[in-house]
Every structure is written in structure tokens, then in C-alpha cells.
Amino acid sequence: MPSDPSHEDAAATLAGDPPQILVADDDVQLCTSLTHVLARAGYAVATVKNGREALDYLAEHPVALLITDIFMPGFDGLELIFALRRIEPRPRLIAMSGGIDACMPDALNVAAALGAEATLSKPFEAAQLLRCVRATLG
């Protein structure tokens, strides 16, 4: 993901407590990039490596938005999205994926059908991420 445009930073800065965002992805480099872009835009960000860690985190820390990868080892993003149906309050949800799995080529459509408010295909630009986050949070 290319660096975020600096003109987005000023417009994205939020007043008051920043919305909490949790990113679930096994790609450490992507998590670092997303954290940087979202934090510069004024959001508070935490990261986890898979769906199980996300559920554990959500049990202790309510978040406004969960951004999850679909394909992760162990407990994947689709399992996470399905499990979120039992969580109250349920965070808003963005699903992302860059891989095409032969068994599930339409994984982002499945994620949307399971309840993701938005989807992102990797790779995506920082500005696209920020637009998606803002639209999903309202």
C-alpha cells in the first residue's frame, strides 16, 4: 500500500476520543502499514494475527470497527465474521482479501453476505482505505 497523502491527514483528524479499530491479519507488514495510515488519520488501532485472537480481543475491548483479512491460518476471516453474530455490541466490519482461493474465489462476496458492511481487494491505496473506513463508521 503506497503512503497516504498528507492532505488526507488534516481532514481525517477526529475530535474527542478516536474510534477504536481492530485489524486482524497474519501479514505483519500490512498490519504495520494499516496501523500507520489509520493512526495518522486519528484512529486508535490494535492488531491481531487471526480470528481467534480477534475474538479474544473483542471479549475484553469493544471496538467501533473490525478490519479482517479473509485468508488467515487457523481461524480465518469468514469464521470470524460468522462468530461476530454472537457478539454484542457487534463492531462494524470491513473484510479484505488479496488472495484467490480455488475453493472460494468469491470470498469477499461471501463476507458481505455474512455481514461485512464493506470489502476491500488487496492491494489498495491508503486513500481508498480511509474512504472505506469513514463510510463504514458513518
Image: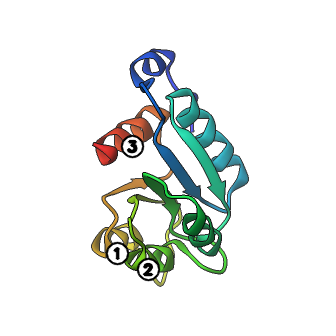
Q: Quadrant of residue 91?
A: bottom left
The kind of secondary structure element at disc 3 is: helix
Q: Is residue 82 above or below residue 90?
A: below
Q: Residues within 10 Å of mark 1 (few under 14, many from 20)?
A: some
Q: CA distance from mark 1 to mark 2?
A: 9 Å
The kind of secondary structure element at disc 1 is: helix
Sequence-earlier tag: 1 or 2: 2
Q: Residues within 10 Å of mark 3 (few under 14, many from 20)?
A: many
Q: Which disc, if any, is residue 133?
A: 3
Sequence-earlier tag: 2 or 3: 2
Q: Which disc, if any, is residue 110?
A: 1
Q: The disc labelled 3 sits on which kind of residue?
A: Val
Task: State the residue in front, 122 or 58.
Answer: 58
Q: The disc labelled 2 sits on which kind of residue?
A: Met
Q: CA distance from mark 3 to mark 1?
A: 20 Å
Q: Position of residue 17 (x, y in %)?
A: 48, 34
Tell me whether the residue at label 1 lies in contact with that at label 2, contact meaning CB atoms closer than 8 angstroms.
yes
Q: Residues within 10 Å of mark 2 (few under 14, many from 20)?
A: few
Q: Position of residue 75 (x, y in %)?
A: 60, 79
The residue where tag 2 is placed is 104
